[in-house]
Amino acid sequence: MTLRLGARGSTLSLAQTEQVARLLAPFAEVEIRTFRTTGDRLSRLGAEISGKGVFTKEIDEALLEGRVDVGVHSLKDLPSAIPQGLALAAVPAREDARDVLLSRSGSTLARLPAGARVGTGSPRRRAQLLAARPDLEILEARGNVDTRIRRMREGRWDAIVLARAGLARLGRLEDICEVLPEEVMLPAIGQGALALVVRREDGRAAEIVRRLDDPASHRAVLAERALLTCLEAGCRAPLAGHARVRGEEAVLRAAVFSPDGDRLLREEGLGRAEDPERLGRQVGEKLLARGAAGLIAEARA
């Protein structure tokens, strides 16, 4: 059987998909097909990206139409509800989910001078940067990893914040000046994980793809996605969440911020690894009881 993998054509997406293809090679012939998604077009135009699914829509359509057999995505790009007819078949072993700082001077976050310009396109990162260093100037940053690093080095920003996982997959860990601890920068939902999506009716593709599934990583992201669903938060909300599975237990840390980082709500929950979605809902309900809906609405406005 030949498995046709559908992926975005970006450098990072191709690196991720080629990694998946190598892992699948012992079990099937593999072919990679690339797509330009709505999110790619908006990003190229420098437009604001709102709503989940803009980086997956075209690949989902190709899956449903039978033009590809597996969609390979960064899990944080998945909408909270996967389109009808598709299923999340596997989550391979997750990379380090933390964020990292890159700076022109080699400085860490604490050593950046007052007024330093830090680039990010993420409301979550913006809020947490301002919570840690309200004296910084946070500027909009768009484009792929290579583009952002080049623009920083050209002087557009003094520093940028990226996901460590992306740099690891691109072989660019040497560019990192500091791995940001979760106490300072809690990761995004699903950050560092890959999602392998198949048609529900395609049992053969699902059977092959499930060989790559890492149960601990899969359960962790299910807890995070249940949190996202509970809070009804979109990609523009300053929401962070990271779960870890240790044996029979799962721990989920989550936070919701005001856009300026001045107000924040943090919660942590412990639950059974075999029921990660319940844990996600429990932590989400705790945040809602403390006023998270108001912060999310403020960010949307």
Image (cartoon, helix red, strand yellow):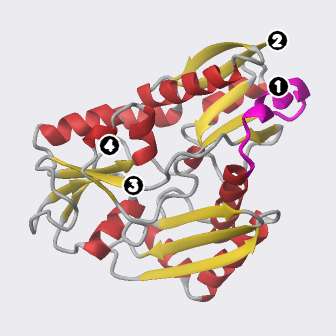
Q: Residues within 10 Å of mark 1 (few under 14, many from 20)?
A: many
Which numbered circle lies on residue 99?
3
What amino acid type is highlighted by mark number 4? Arg
- Sequence-wise first label, 3 or 4: 3
Q: Of discs 3 and 4, which sits in the foreground?
A: 3
Q: Quadrant of residue 136?
A: bottom left
- Disc on the earlier residue, 2 or 3: 2
Pinpoint residue 139: horizontal percent, then vertical percent: 23, 55
Callout 3 amino acid: Asp
Nearest-to-viewer mark from 1 and 4: 1
Q: Which residue in the rendered view is the most extreme toward the bottom?
A: 290
Which image quarter is the C terminus in? Answer: bottom left
Where disc 3 sits, the SS reads: strand
- Compare residues 249 and 208 and report the one nearer the observer: 249
For the residues marked 3 and 1, what is the alpha-carbon distance in whole angstroms?
33 Å
Q: Residue at x 61, y 63 (%)?
A: 243
Residue 28 visible in image: yes
- The quarter holding residue 83 reads top right
Residue 201: give x, y in percent of width and height: 90, 31
> In this view of the protein, which residue sits in the foreground, 74 or 179?
179
Which residue is labeled 1 in the image?
205
Q: Are marks 2 and 1 in contact (CB under 8 Å)?
A: yes
